[in-house]
Image (tube, grey):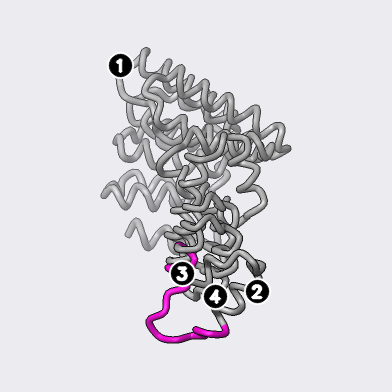
Amino acid sequence: FQVQQKDKSDEEVAHAINQKLGDTPGISYSEIASRAYDCGRTELAIKLLEYEPRSGEQVPLLLKMKRSKLALSKAIESGDTDLVYTVVLHLKNELNRGTFFMTLQNQPVALSLYRQFCKHQERETLKDLYNQDDNHQELGNFHVHSSYSEKRIEGRVGALQNALDEYYKAKNEFAAKATEDQIKLLRLQQHLQEDFDKPYLDLSLHDTVSNLILDGHCKRAEQLYREFKIPDKRYWWLKISALANRGDWEEMEKFSKSKKSPIGYLPFVEISVKHHNRYEAKKYAPRVTPEQRVKAFVLVG
């Protein structure tokens, strides 16, 4: 009855109803608010909803009354993630794209949840969000992620090139260099695949070099070592491991004499013994440094 009184302000009516009903069990302020809304008293309905303790009852009615931004604030206050998602997706359908994004900008919690949603459901929208924020770092990450879903090599290189541009704008030199190297590696792997008719695409740099040595293409492996500036120690370990796996002891001995080993000669002994070749291991034992020589001779027996 009171919701229909026209001679009192919304504030007064809401207060009077609350004074009368208080927190009486079984009383639903959202139902009374809904009645007020049906009577054309939207502001009264909103005031009554202030007394409704259950966010799950408040929020749907606020959405029905086209008070979406207030509904979003209430949903965020409640800490109920599902409720926030409900309002965000409602806003997405109700508002134009620009207004929707601007609304989210003012609500970091909702924006964060919507980004999570987009990561799994609407990746292109995610790109728009990052563009609006001029977030070049995340745009770079977005393009790297997109490159993995590209089937053709040109598509992948294109996506990585986009990522590279964004990383430069973000002044992230480390990410830019890593992306540049990845583009270079993909191009090289494409040529290797064409030249040797073997799968090289998508291998790591380490595995690409290792496979080249295993397949007897030491010169091409050397080319990658120089182009990608692989540290000497890492390359020597990689090469002697691959040569031992291949059983190419002659090449391994030749390599050991090519220049002074940056990893010493104990690894040559250890790898030879690991592959049950004590004969080869004995060749390297005398070349091991004095402090490691005892260990080397124990290994070769």
Q: Is residue 97 magenta?
A: no
Residue that appears at 48% across and 71% down: 1
Q: On the image, numbered disc 1 is attached to which residue?
A: 197
Which of the two discs, 2 and 3, labels the residue nearer the N terminus? Answer: 2
Name the spot of residue 109 as percent of width and height, x first. 58, 58
Q: Which residues are magenta?
A: 19-34
Q: Amino acid at mark 4?
A: Tyr
**Dot 1 surroundings within 10 Å: few (below 14), some, or many (20 or more)?**
few
Q: Horizontally, is 70 left or right of 266 in the view? A: right
Q: Is residue 287 visible?
A: no
Q: Amino acid at mark 2?
A: Glu
Which of the two discs, 3 and 4, labels the residue nearer the N terminus? Answer: 3
Q: Nearer the viewer, mark 2 or mark 1?
A: 2
Question: Hey, which quadrant is residue 172 in on the image?
Answer: top right
Residue that appears at 36% across and 59% down: 299
Question: Which secondary structure, mark 1?
Answer: loop
Q: On the image, numbered disc 3 is attached to which residue?
A: 32
Q: Cα distance, mark 3 to mark 1?
A: 75 Å
In this rendered view, identify the residue nearer to me: 66 or 249. Answer: 66
Give the tally of numbered discs: 4
Q: Cα distance, mark 2 to mark 1?
A: 84 Å
Q: Which mark is residue 12?
A: 2
Q: On the image, numbered disc 4 is attached to which residue?
A: 51
Q: Nearer the viewer, mark 3 or mark 4?
A: 3
In this rendered view, identify the residue nearer to me: 183 or 234. Answer: 183
Contact (Cβ within 8 Å) of mark 4 with mark 1:
no
Question: Which secondary structure, mark 4?
Answer: loop
